[in-house]
Image (cartoon, rainbow, N blue to C red):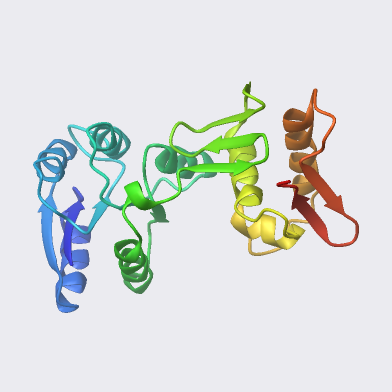
Amino acid sequence: MKLLLVEDDQETADYICQGLEEHGHRVERAADGHAGLMLAGDGTAYDVLIIDRMLPKLDGVTLLKTLRASGVKTPAIFLTAMGSIDDRVRGLESGGDDYLVKPFAFAELYARVVSLARRPPLAAAETVLQAGDLTLDLISRTATRGGQRIELQPTEFRLLEYLMRRPGKIVTRTMLLEGVWEFHFDPKTNIVETQVSRLRSKIDRGFTKERIRTVRGAGYMLDAE
């Protein structure tokens, strides 16, 4: 693979480059956001971009937004110390395909990079999800039902996307905790039930047919008929 690493910390960059090169891959480096933008935007074909968020001259989010706006579809992973849920959401909404928080294990970074390199190009990936009269645009981050715009918060959007990718299938509470909130434990709260209720009220308001059904004792199901 040919990779671009945009990282201003010399020690971290050396560590990553050494590991990737030991696996036989070619790595080009940029120490600030502007240099990364120039390299990634000049038509050079990279398999994956690895981008820090806190960069001099141009931050990582602005860097990736600019690349996406100019048509660069290269898979990108953020590698950053900014690890809150809001930070992750902003990174993914800016066009990131994955997000890994420092400190990190190189083995995990490498596995994620290889996974991204295997993904189909963005142009070939599904960008609009449809379930009857309900539509979710993954590029513009908008939801509509019957042509009416539905205003969703980031968590609500992720929740609806998770359900719409599994139409007609039962989705359990545990699946939602892991897939939407990235919880690998039970937080002992009603966060799932509350968010599903809020999402249901938004997408079903004004319509006679319910799109999100509760399957008693099992979980939830998105009705795509």
Can you give x and y, in whole percent of width and height, for residue 152 in the image? 62, 30
Can you give x and y, in whole percent of width and height, for residue 110 in the image? 31, 69
Closer to us: 32 or 124 = 124
Closer to us: 40 or 146 = 146
Closer to us: 35 or 66 = 66
Side of 38 where 84 appears, left or right: right
Which quadrant holds residue 186? bottom right
The number of discs equals: 0
Q: Is residue 154 visible?
A: yes
Q: Residue at x 77, y 44 (%)?
A: 212
Q: Residue at x 19, y 78 (%)?
A: 23
Closer to us: 15 or 156 = 156
Q: Residue at x 69, y 64 (%)?
A: 185
Can you give x and y, in whole percent of width and height, for residue 68 in the image? 28, 37
Side of 215 where 107 appears, left or right: left
The relative height of residue 143 versus residue 88 in the rendered view (above or below) is above
Q: Residue at x 27, y 31 (%)?
A: 69
Can you give x and y, in whole percent of width and height, for residue 108 in the image? 38, 70
Side of 87 where 111 appears, left or right: left
The relative height of residue 31 versus residue 47 in the rendered view (above or below) is above
Q: Is residue 181 visible?
A: no
The relative height of residue 30 versus residue 207 in the rendered view (above or below) is below
Side of 60 where 38 appears, left or right: left
Quadrant containing the N terminus in the rendered view? bottom left
